[in-house]
Amino acid sequence: MPRVRRGLSVSTLALVILFAAGGTGLAAPPPPPNPSDSEIDASKADANAKAGEVGRLTNQLAQAEQKLSQLQDDVELKQEEANKALVDLQTAQDAATQAENDAKAARTEADAAAAAIEKARDDLKSFAAASFQQGSTVGSLSAYLSADSPKDMLARAQLLDAVGGDRLNALDRLQQAQTDKANKDAAARKAAEIAQQKQDAARQAKNGADAAQAAAVRAQDGQASQNTQLEKNKSDVEQQLYAAQTKVSGLQGQRQRYQDWLAQKKREDEERARQAALASAGGGGRPSGGPAPSGPAGSSIEAVIARALARLGMPYAWGGGNASGPTRGIRDGGVADSYGDYNKIGFDCSGLMIYAFAGVRSLPHYSGYQYSAGRQVPLSQMRRGDLLFWGGPGGIHHVALYLGGGQMVEAPQSGLRVRIAPVRYGGIMPYATRLVG
């Protein structure tokens, strides 16, 4: 009998040990990787550095865009100056053409004056010939004394007066014609000279304006090229930031899984010790009422994300959305009304978050209040399920749900639909809000 009891006791102890080892349902799996603090800190530092670089490039790009806008204004100004110079040149060319026509008219008049001079000279020659044919000095006393009768003397007196008047008239006409010709020649030369000066000045101004416009366009093109390069650099660094943040999230996830494993292993060890103590005290079997294993970490967040993704493609409706689903939008008296949001069934950005977190957290229908509804973490530490916000000194104007890998789900704006999009870092708030975990 003692031998039988001893064998039974050994069998019972073996069953207790076997049950303790495998019958609890809490056996811990092999430990997952546990990144060191230095690895996590280094990844955070890298992500912070990339975030700082994105911020620096964003500032540079903003300054470059402002400069490009100024250069565009300068180009438009130079274009107007070039237009003015073109008008002035056309006006000067018209004036030069008119001056040339005036000069031609003056030359025609001068030629007429020259003909008048020749006529006056011919008249003077005729007068001289007439005097010579009379055989006397015009106007001398002998012309009167040689008369044969009083009647002849009177006729000669009348002839002398007429000849004297013709001579004087001929001389006057000659002098006047010479004066007119000189004046008209001088006026024509002066008009042509002034018109040429104006045309040269206008042409020089036009060339200068064209050169200034070309220089402004070159400066604008050069700045546009710089902006394109800055955009590319910013995009590249943003991709590096996404990768760095993903690495941080991955390492933190590994650390969290390792800590969960430690906690599970601790519970397993405690349960084994308790069952061993009961077995050694003569008990046996598994005690009732033991702690049930907890649900997997992040299950609530996955439910939140699943609810948000289930509404992809729903229209944006300003003021729309609640915990039960999409609702009709409301009037805003502005942009939303112009898109007819008040006639649409859908979500706005904060309404989508209310629906996604329904059953987990109750949220107000305002992104500014949602920003302070949970624990705020730096963007370098954001993880799947965090809320991202955009705004500035005037307040917050947009919220989205981070999906990880640089992607987010959002109800963007009037005229668009609920969608998945890359995270936009322009105007993003420095902290993400964590509502779960």
Image (spheres, grey):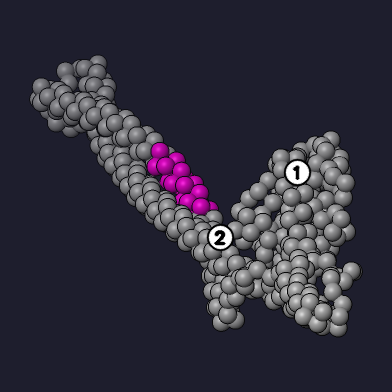
Residue 16: quadrant of the picture: bottom right
Above or below, 356 relative to 92: below
Q: Is residue 349 visible?
A: no
- Decide which of 39, 150 is in the foreground and name it: 39
Q: Amino acid at mark 2?
A: Gln
Q: Is residue 241 magenta?
A: no
Residue depicted at 69% across the width and 51% down the height: 409
What separation in Å lies between label 1 and label 2 (alpha carbons)? 39 Å
Quadrant housing the C terminus? bottom right
- Which numbered dot is residue 230? none
Tell me the residue at 12%/24% (across/down).
129
Q: Amino acid at mark 1?
A: Arg
Q: Nearer the viewer, residue 42 or 370?
A: 42
In the drawing, what numbered circle is on residue 66?
A: 2
Percent x, y for residue 280? Answer: 82, 83
Residue contact between numbered discs 1 and 2, judged by CB atoms under 8 Å? no
Magenta-drawn stretch, dominant element (helix, strand or loop): helix
Residue 262: x percent and y percent?
69, 76
Residue visible at 42% across and 39% down in the picture: 91
Find the magenta span and give its range. 72-90
Residue nearest the observer in this picture, 359 or 238:
359
Q: Is residue 12 visible?
A: yes
